[in-house]
Image (spheres, coloured by chain):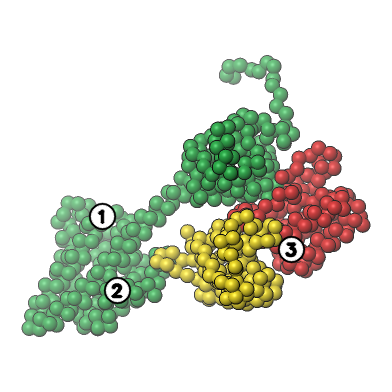
Chain colours: A red, B yellow, C green
């Protein structure tokens, strides 16, 4: 299932759907990397509100999205991790250490705008 | 309500199937949402291990009972290479975030009971149980 | 059991108590309650029905002759209702149907008595009454065939034991249910999540933290973060008496989980000494933001959120009339 990516000013917004396969996630990473390069985006918001499970593969891929986009000059914020999912993730020992996180799309965009204005707080 | 479901694991889509079935069974058992997510996450991890290390296997989901307690049992079985050093695999340093490890210590934290039966060349069976509080 | 005075059979209570077909079969096997016993009890049925009313009258006269148990049956309506319940119970002993419906009926009676507050000693005493009065009648009736009388008596006794065990289990289960509810209430009371300002939550923890409590605390906090859109959380552990590595790891997990939801956690109330000790035993505190006291934590939180607290040079003093 293809993940739609929207452009909003200097930012890109990708909203993930529920039944996301491994292949979809990898495809998303590659697409985001390409678009950031082409559109010279400064920020990326990946909204995972619909994910009811984030396992080790999903985590690795989210992290690699953050890394690849950063290489091309954009900061990524992961938003929408649900309470139950966050709890399961820490139980499993997974951390999103160098990746910014925010509560939802609104907060994520606010964070990116603060960053852009130079002097916002990192979510971590 | 079926007491037992078997999900063959041969592709990444099967991982999704296994965890969705697990969540469904957990919901039927009356597990709160938080526990449902823990169970689904643990199933996702063990199913993923099967795929990664053995290419194919099976996840069996079962309703279990012990006295007054009711719960779910997850048995992840494969005929893969087996785990050579189980002690190392159970160490937390072998984290899933680095992509090196099997996430087994994490699975143990997610569930109430945990058992792994494995030897080189003989495959692996991971048994997980969680009880409704 | 088509007695209309019976409440609808509560199968869900049986499920909660773990009383399944399988379990009931094991129970019967454990007490060696076989098909033969079922047969014998059925044979007794006609005989038992003939004196059912008499036995029930005798039972309640017994109850009414003791001050302590008289009190429960002052209301004639209650007395009538309980008598007809008991009569149905008594008949059930020899009707020959000892499956889960039977179990449900027994559990129902047990829970009714538990709820009206009839103490165990009086309630269980009723079983002896049955064995005594019914036993006497059986031996009188079949005095020319002692073997038969004995076999009837023993079958009845097995059933009485099965019933007694159910009664005790029901009482225990209901008590444990109450305890669980109270524990839940205590847990909720003991860790309130308070919203101080928009975007700021404070979680003052008092008392010991075990795994169960840590989990509940964390889940509650994560839910509150979502509900209030909090960006900063102050976790105050001044009131936690013993902070060992286990507790520290629970806190780290809470911090990590909150961060995944975009919230920064500031831990206050962790003394320098304790922090030092934890670091020495290998706990990685670098990932937690700590501030010595609550006030300091508040100031840090406000700073992060972009609040500036300005003091009024001439605040109003005294109370306003």
Could you confirm whether marks 2 and 3 are on the same chain?
no
Secondary structure beneath dot 1 equals: loop
The span from disc 2 to disc 1 (Cα, nearest Å) is 28 Å
Q: Which circle, 2 or 3, is nearer the viewer?
A: 2
Q: From the viewer's side, name the closer residue of B42 and C285.
A: C285
Residue C179 vs residue C216: left or right? Answer: left
* Number of numbered markers: 3
Could you confirm whether marks 2 and 1 are on the same chain?
yes
Pointer 2: what residue?
C30
Q: Which circle, 2 or 1, is nearer the viewer?
A: 2
Q: Residue C299, how many percent across, how many down?
A: 67, 30
Pointer 3: what residue?
A17
Write the residue at 77% across / 57% down: A64
The span from disc 3 to disc 1 (Cα, nearest Å) is 58 Å
Question: Around disc 1, counting alpha carbons within 10 Å, would you say few (fewer than 14), some (14 to 19), or many (20 or more)?
Answer: some
Chain letter of disc 2 in the image: C
Q: Can residue C137 be seen in this view?
A: yes
Secondary structure beneath dot 3 equals: loop
Q: Which circle, 3 or 1, is nearer the viewer?
A: 3
Q: Can residue B25 be seen in this view?
A: no
Task: Give the quarter of the image for residue C107.
Answer: bottom left
Write the residue at 31% across / 66% down: C166
Of all residues, the one furthest to the left in this rendering is: C144
Write the residue at 64% across / 30% down: C296
Asked if the residue under mark 1 is in contact with the one under mark 3, i.e. CB atoms within 8 Å, the reply is no
Chain letter of disc 3 in the image: A
Pointer 1: what residue?
C119
Q: From the viewer's side, name the closer residue of B41 and C127.
A: B41
């Amino acid at each position: 299932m293809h993940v739609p990516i929207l452009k909003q000013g200097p930012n890109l917004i990708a909203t993930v759907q529920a039944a996301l396969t491994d292949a979809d996630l990898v495809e998303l990473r590659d697409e985001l990397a390409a678009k950031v390069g082409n559109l010279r985006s400064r920020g990326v918001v990946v909204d995972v509100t619909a994910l009811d499970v984030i396992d080790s593969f999903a985590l690795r891929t989210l992290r690699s999205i953050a890394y690849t986009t950063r290489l091309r000059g954009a900061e990524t914020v992961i938003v929408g991790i649900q309470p139950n999912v966050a709890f399961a993730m820490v139980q499993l020992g997974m951390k999103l250490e160098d990746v910014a996180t925010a509560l939802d799309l609104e907060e994520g965009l606010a964070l990116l705008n603060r960053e852009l204005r130079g002097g916002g707080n990192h979510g971590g | 309500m079926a007491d037992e479901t078997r999900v063959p694991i041969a592709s990444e889509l099967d991982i999704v199937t296994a965890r969705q079935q697990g969540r469904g069974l957990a919901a039927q058992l009356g597990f709160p949402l938080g526990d449902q997510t823990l169970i689904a996450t643990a199933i996702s991890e063990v199913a993923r291990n099967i795929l990664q290390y053995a290419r194919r296997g099976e996840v069996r989901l079962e309703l279990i009972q012990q006295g007054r307690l009711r719960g779910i049992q997850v048995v992840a079985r494969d005929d893969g290479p087996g785990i050579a050093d189980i002690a190392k695999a159970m160490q937390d340093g072998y984290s899933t975030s680095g992509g090196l490890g099997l996430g087994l210590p994490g699975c143990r934290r997610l569930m109430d009971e945990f058992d792994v039966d494995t030897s080189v060349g003989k495959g692996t069976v991971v048994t997980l149980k969680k009880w409704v509080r | 059991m088509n007695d209309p005075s019976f409440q609808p059979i509560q199968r869900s209570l049986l499920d909660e108590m773990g009383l399944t077909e399988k379990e009931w079969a094991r129970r019967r096997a454990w007490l060696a309650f076989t098909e033969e016993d079922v047969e014998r009890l059925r044979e007794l049925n006609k005989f038992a029905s003939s004196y059912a009313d008499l036995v029930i009258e005798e039972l309640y006269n017994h109850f009414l002759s003791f001050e302590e148990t008289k009190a429960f049956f002052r209301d004639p309506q209650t007395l009538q209702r309980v008598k007809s319940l008991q009569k149905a119970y008594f008949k059930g002993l020899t009707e020959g149907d000892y499956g889960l419906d039977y179990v449900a009926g027994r559990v129902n009676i047990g829970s009714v008595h538990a709820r009206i507050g009839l103490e165990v000693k009086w309630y269980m005493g009723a079983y002896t009454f049955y064995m005594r009065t019914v036993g006497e009648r059986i031996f009188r009736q079949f005095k020319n065939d002692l073997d038969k009388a004995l076999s009837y008596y023993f079958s009845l006794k097995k059933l009485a034991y099965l019933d007694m065990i159910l009664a005790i289990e029901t009482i225990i289960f209901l008590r444990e249910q109450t305890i669980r509810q109270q524990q839940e209430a205590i847990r909720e009371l003991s860790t309130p999540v308070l919203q101080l300002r928009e975007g700021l939550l404070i979680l003052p923890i008092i008392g010991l933290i075990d795994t169960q409590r840590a989990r509940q605390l964390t889940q509650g906090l994560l839910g509150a973060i979502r509900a209030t859109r909090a960006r900063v959380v102050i976790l105050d552990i001044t009131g936690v008496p013993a902070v060992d590595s286990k507790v520290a790891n629970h806190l780290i997990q809470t911090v990590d989980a909150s961060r995944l939801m975009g919230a920064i956690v500031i831990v206050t109330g962790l003394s320098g000494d304790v922090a030092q000790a934890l670091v020495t035993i290998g706990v990685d505190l670098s990932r937690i933001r700590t501030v010595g006291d609550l006030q300091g934590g508040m100031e840090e939180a406000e700073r992060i959120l972009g609040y500036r607290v300005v003091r009024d040079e001439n605040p109003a003093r005294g109370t306003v009339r």
